[in-house]
Image (tube, helix red, strand yellow):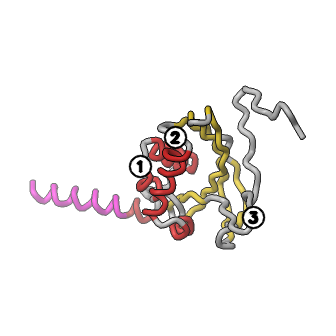
Amino acid sequence: MPNRFLIWTGLCLLLSLLLSGCGLLKNKENPTELVEQFLYLEQQGNFGSSWEKLHPEIQQYWPKEAYIQERAKVFMQIFGARQFEYQLGKPETIEEWTNPLTGTTFTKVQLVPTKITFSSAFGTMSLLQNYYLAMSGDTWYILWDINLRAPAHSAPAPFINDGQDSGNPHPQ
């Protein structure tokens, strides 16, 4: 009887090693789910854990402690926002995207436009931000289009139509 137990244990161990080696058990989460996880952590004020989902290039630009302090400062201290809601736009595959911060070119990037809405000391506000997701190894990471050489980001955030008219009543 003990021999059968050892044989079954060995077979199960061998099978799990084979499956993980084939990539069947590796982390291949959906990029949209990654943005959902990231924003959920940000909603909770858990900026340290959300930072872990950023691509190493963004982590290098924003060291963890600085990121935590700045995110809390911008949302909580400056805007006075204690909570926010978000809406994800339709994901889009970009064949080739260059990070304006580093010049690194990524292929097969997923663009997830995002609208974050919160109440602030200045009234209800919405921010549009593009989330660029790139694979590094077998894991998706978040990138932003941070451009130090220009006041605006590299590509306009696509408008997310939520059924409300949010246009400018006084176009120029």
What SS does tag 2 mark?
A: loop
Q: What amino acid does circle 2 point to? A: Gly
Q: Determine if residue 82 is in view.
A: yes
Q: Determine if residue 137 is in view.
A: no
Earlier in the chain: of badge 2 and badge 3, it is: 2
What SS does tag 3 mark?
A: loop
What SS does tag 1 mark?
A: loop
Which residue is pictured at 47% across the width and 50% down the height? 72
Let me know if residue 13 is in the magenta part. Answer: yes
Q: What amino acid does circle 1 point to? A: Asn
For residue 167, above or below residue 92: above
Question: What range is drawn magenta here?
Answer: 1-17
Q: Could you say which is closer to the camera, residue 62 or residue 9? A: 62
Q: Which mark is residue 46?
A: 1
Residue indicated by mark 3: 150
Residue indicated by mark 2: 80
Residue at the bottom extreme of this rendering:
103
Residue at the right extreme of this rendering:
172
